[in-house]
Amino acid sequence: MCYCFKMKLAIIEGSSTAYGTGSTEHGGWAAAVHRDSLRYNETHSLNPLIVTNLAVPGKNINSVNKDFSEARPSHMTGKNGASLLRILSVGQNEARFGPGMPGPIVSPSAFEGQLIVFAEATAAEGGSAIFVGPQHVDESLTRPCGDTGWTIRNDYIDDYSERIRTVSTEFDIPYVDVKSMFRLYRPSDVLAADGRHPNGFGHSLIHEAVRATISEMHFLDS
């Protein structure tokens, strides 16, 4: 008997939202995607989707690209014959700025350039990608963010979201527009008490949208 299957690998990359901060369940939307991959026994046995969450609070697009080019072991790329899907959740950490800083920690133009680097590196591996955009924040709680000294403003979030959309269109990468989804609700309905991370309901909305996108790309049964 021959057990022949082709592994599919989904890598979730980004910062605290993808990490699961603000969720009432451990791991937030990314952990829910992982649970989805285990739910379909036949698919998982014959054509498994392996989900790995590499998101870390405080990370930004620069460090995501650096890790992929320099530190990613070979089994985490498409070079081992697996179908590779990279799910990138960015746009909020890059938009923050601290006292005395003239602008965001990653400028909008540099952010767009790093998105292109991400897209090109993914294509070079024969992989696919999904962009998960940032959500608006409650500015009454993010100017500054508690005692962190960091400030996050929605006008910057808007700029970064549009740059994600631009690169998404250029490289034909699906874009989960979290900002637009969350606009259908009051901030308190979708944001945690800190005013910047999704709460449990917010994470569930992101999960539903990401799961639908993964299914459309045939990485996961619907």
Image (cartoon, grey):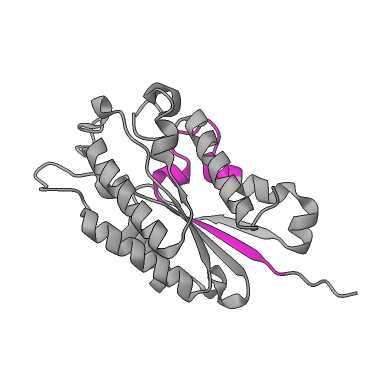
Please say whether residue 152 is one of the residues in the magenta stretch. no
Residue 27 appears in the figure: no
- Answer with the quarter of the image where residue 149 lies: top left
Number of numbered discs visible in the structure rendering: 0
Residue drawn at point x = 51 percent, y = 30 percent: 200
- Answer with the quarter of the image where residue 112 lies: bottom left
- 146 shown above or below 109: above
Instruction: Classify residue 52 as left or right of residue 115.
Output: right
- 77 shown above or below 166: below
**Residue 84, image x, y percentages:** 56, 66
**Residue 14, image x, y percentages:** 41, 52
Residue 102 appears in the figure: yes
**Residue 31, image x, y percentages:** 57, 44
Q: Which residues are magenta?
A: 6-32
151 or 205: nearer the viewer: 205
Please say whether residue 26 is one of the residues in the magenta stretch. yes
Which quadrant: the N terminus? bottom right
Residue drawn at point x = 34 percent, y = 34 percent: 196
Residue drawn at point x = 57 percent, y = 50 percent: 213
**Residue 181, image x, y percentages:** 45, 35
- 87 shown above or below 123: above
Instruction: Classify residue 146 as left or right of residue 216.
Output: left
